[in-house]
Image: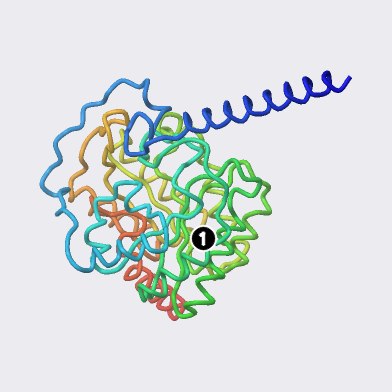
C-alpha cells in the first residue's frame, strides 16, 4: 500500500516538475527583443515592404546630442520610465530632450493595437506597475517641468482601459509639483464602459488630448482597431463633463488623404468643441508600415493652419514636424491666453 502511495506521489511530483519546466520554456520563448522589427511588430511581419521615399530638406532634423539631452535621458532611466519620444521614433526628440521635455508613456511599452502607422510594439502587455505614477511624479519634479505631457499605450486588456492609472498619475504629479500643468494624451477606451472617462476627467488634467490620427475614410487601413466617430464623441464628452478642460486632437497628413477630407475633420472637431488641433507629416517608421503617399509642402501646412483659424480653433499647430506634444508647454500658454482673450471679447 505504502509503495503505491509513494509511486503515485512520485508521479504527481514528476508531472508538476514537467509542467513547471514547460511553463518556464514557454515564458522564455515569449521573451521578445523589441529592437528587432519582426519581433516588435509581429502583426506586420507578413506585410509586403513599402518603399521609404527620401525625405525632403524641410523634414530633416539633427541627431540628438548635448548635455541637456543626456540629463533628460538619465532621469528617464533612473526612474525606469518609458517615453513615447523613443518608442514612436519622434523626429523632435533631440530638440525636446535638450530642453528637459520628454513625453512619458505610462502602462508599459507594448500596445494591444496594431495601427499601421505606429512604431510602438504590439502584443500582450505586462501587468500595471502600481509604483509608476510615483516615479513619473518624481521625474517631473527632477526635470522642473512647468508643463508635462503624459501618454500611454492602448490597454484593451484592462477593464477600464487604464483610466484609473491615468488618474493616479495626474494626482501624483499634482501632489509633487502643484504648479505644473498637465496634458494627457489618452487611448480611446473603446472597449470600456462609458463611465471610465469620468474617472480621468475627475482628476482634472489641464489638457485632454486624444488624436483622431487621420480622415475617417482611411481608418480601416491606418487605424483598424479604432472607430472615428467614437474618438470624436470621446472628445465631445470631455467638454460635457468639464468645460474648463482644454481639448486637443491631431491628425497626420501624407497618408493618402484629400484636402477636403482634412477640412471635414476640422469641422467635425469644431462640432465636438475641440480647442486645439495639430497637423503633422506622417513619417514611415519601417518598410512594413503604411506607405508615405507624399510629403506635404510647408505651404500646404500653412494653408491648413489658415483654414483652421478660420473655423474657430483656439490654437492650431500645422507644420511638417508638428507632433502632439511638440512645444506643448509654449502652446498651452498661448492656448490659455487665447481663451482669456475670447472670453474678454464676449
Where does the image place residue 277, in percent across and percent down from the top left? Answer: 38, 56
In the displayed structure, 116 sits above or below 243; it is above
Label 1 crowd bin: few (<14), some (14–19), many (20+), radius 10 Å: many
Q: Which residue is mark 1?
A: 132
Q: Is residue 197 left or right of residue 182?
A: right
In the displayed structure, 66 sits above or below 124; it is below
Of residues 88 and 332, which is closer to you in this image? 88
Where does the image place residue 14, in percent across and percent down from the top left? Answer: 67, 24
Of residues 93 and 306, which is closer to you in this image? 93
Dividing the picture into quarters, in which one does residue 47 lie? top left
Q: Is residue 87 left or right of residue 71?
A: right
- Residue at the image position 24 percent from the left and 63 percent from the top: 70
The N terminus lies in quadrant: top right
In the displayed structure, 88 sits above or below 177; it is above
Q: Say what secondary structure mark 1 lies in.
A: helix
Q: Is residue 270 visible?
A: no
- Residue at the image position 28 percent from the left and 30 percent from the top: 291
Q: Is residue 1 visible?
A: yes
Amino acid at each position: 500500500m505504502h509503495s503505491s502511495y509513494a509511486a503515485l506521489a512520485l508521479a504527481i511530483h514528476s508531472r508538476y516538475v514537467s509542467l513547471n519546466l514547460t511553463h518556464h520554456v514557454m515564458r522564455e520563448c515569449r521573451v521578445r527583443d523589441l529592437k528587432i522589427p519582426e519581433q516588435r511588430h509581429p502583426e506586420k511581419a507578413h506585410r509586403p515592404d513599402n518603399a521609404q521615399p527620401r525625405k525632403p530638406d524641410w523634414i530633416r532634423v539633427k541627431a540628438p546630442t548635448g548635455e541637456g539631452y543626456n540629463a533628460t535621458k538619465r532621469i528617464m532611466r533612473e526612474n525606469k520610465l518609458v517615453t513615447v519620444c523613443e518608442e514612436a521614433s519622434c523626429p523632435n526628440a533631440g530638440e525636446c530632450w535638450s530642453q528637459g521635455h520628454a513625453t512619458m508613456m505610462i502602462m508599459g511599452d507594448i500596445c494591444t493595437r496594431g495601427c499601421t502607422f505606429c512604431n510602438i510594439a504590439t502584443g500582450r502587455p505586462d501587468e500595471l506597475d502600481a509604483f509608476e505614477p510615483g516615479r513619473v511624479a518624481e521625474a517631473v519634479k527632477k526635470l522642473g517641468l512647468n508643463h508635462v505631457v503624459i501618454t500611454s499605450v492602448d490597454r484593451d486588456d484592462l477593464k477600464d482601459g487604464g483610466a484609473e492609472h491615468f488618474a493616479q498619475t495626474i494626482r501624483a504629479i499634482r501632489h509633487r509639483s502643484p504648479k505644473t500643468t498637465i496634458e494627457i494624451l489618452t487611448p480611446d477606451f473603446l472597449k470600456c464602459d462609458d463611465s471610465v472617462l469620468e474617472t480621468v476627467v475627475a482628476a482634472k488634467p489641464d489638457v485632454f488630448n486624444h488624436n483622431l490620427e487621420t480622415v475617417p475614410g482611411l481608418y480601416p487601413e491606418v487605424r483598424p482597431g479604432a472607430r472615428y466617430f467614437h474618438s470624436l464623441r470621446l472628445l465631445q464628452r470631455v467638454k460635457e463633463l468639464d468645460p474648463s478642460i482644454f481639448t486637443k486632437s491631431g491628425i497626420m497628413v501624407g497618408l493618402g488623404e484629400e484636402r477636403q477630407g482634412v477640412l471635414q475633420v476640422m469641422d467635425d472637431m469644431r462640432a465636438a468643441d475641440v480647442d486645439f488641433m495639430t497637423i503633422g507629416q506622417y513619417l514611415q517608421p519601417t518598410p512594413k508600415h503604411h506607405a508615405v503617399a507624399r510629403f506635404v509642402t510647408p505651404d500646404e501646412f500653412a494653408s491648413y493652419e489658415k483654414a483652421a483659424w478660420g473655423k474657430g480653433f483656439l490654437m492650431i499647430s500645422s507644420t511638417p514636424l508638428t507632433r502632439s506634444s511638440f512645444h506643448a508647454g509654449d502652446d498651452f500658454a498661448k492656448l490659455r491666453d487665447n481663451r482669456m482673450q475670447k472670453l474678454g471679447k464676449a
